Image (cartoon, rainbow, N blue to C red):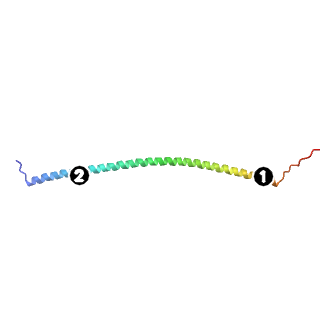
Amino acid sequence: MFSLTPLDILYIVLSFCVLWFTAAVFWFLWQLATILKNVNDTVSDARDKMHKMEQALSGIREKFDRASSLVGLGANTAAKAVEYVMEKKKKMERELEEDVEMPSRKPAFKKKK
């Protein structure tokens, strides 16, 4: 039958060791690939969410810019209107003061004969 020498047994044990070492390396690479895939998926999701947040903030900023420009336009218009009203009021006050200081030069009422 078989006659196993110690050298044959050593080769059989070494072949099993190589087989187990190969299986362990394969398992380690599989786990590493799975972890890297999960990390890649997580980073991709984070990028998508950051992109959505950036779009939302850009939209808010655009709306704020539009609103602030309209508010600025309204404020400028209101300031001009107030300035116009104040000038009219001062002009009317000056005219009233001039009328009080200078009696009218219209001739007095003449009595009918």
Please identify, in this view, whether the residue under mark 2 or under mark 1 is nearer the observer: 1
Residue wearing tag 2: 25
Q: Amino acid at mark 1?
A: Leu
User: Residue extending furthest right?
Assistant: 113
Q: Amino acid at mark 2?
A: Val
Please give the name of the residue rendered at 35% of the width and 49% of the height, measured from the top-left corner.
40
What is the spatial separation of the Cα atoms under label 2 and label 1, in whole angstroms? Answer: 104 Å
Count of residue discs: 2
Q: Are marks 2 and 1 in contact (CB under 8 Å)?
A: no
Q: In the rendered image, which quarter contains the C terminus?
A: top right
Residue 14 position within the rendered picture, expressed as x and y whole percent measured from the top left: 15, 53
Q: Nearer the viewer, residue 112 or 38?
A: 112
Please give the name of the residue rendered at 49% of the width and 48% of the height, measured from the top-left corner.
58
Residue 18 position within the rendered picture, expressed as x and y whole percent measured from the top left: 18, 52
Please give the name of the residue rendered at 58% of the width and 47% of the height, measured from the top-left corner.
70
The answer to whether residue 60 is left or right of residue 12 is right
Q: Residues within 10 Å of mark 1 (few under 14, many from 20)?
A: few
Q: Residues within 10 Å of mark 2 (few under 14, many from 20)?
A: few
Q: Earlier in the sequence, mark 2 or mark 1?
A: 2
| Residue 10 numbered mark, or none | none
The answer to whether residue 21 is left or right of residue 93 is left
Residue 112 position within the rendered picture, expressed as x and y whole percent measured from the top left: 93, 44
The answer to whether residue 89 is left or right of residue 34 is right
Q: Nearer the viewer, residue 27 or 109?
A: 109
The answer to whether residue 5 is left or right of residue 101 is left
Please give the name of the residue rendered at 16% of the width and 51% of the height, measured from the top-left corner.
16
Residue 55 position within the rendered picture, expressed as x and y whole percent measured from the top left: 46, 47
Which of the 4 quarters of the picture holds residue 101? bottom right
User: Residue extending furthest top?
Assistant: 113
Q: Secondary structure at mark 1?
A: helix
| Residue 96 numbered mark, or none | 1
Q: Secondary structure at mark 2?
A: helix
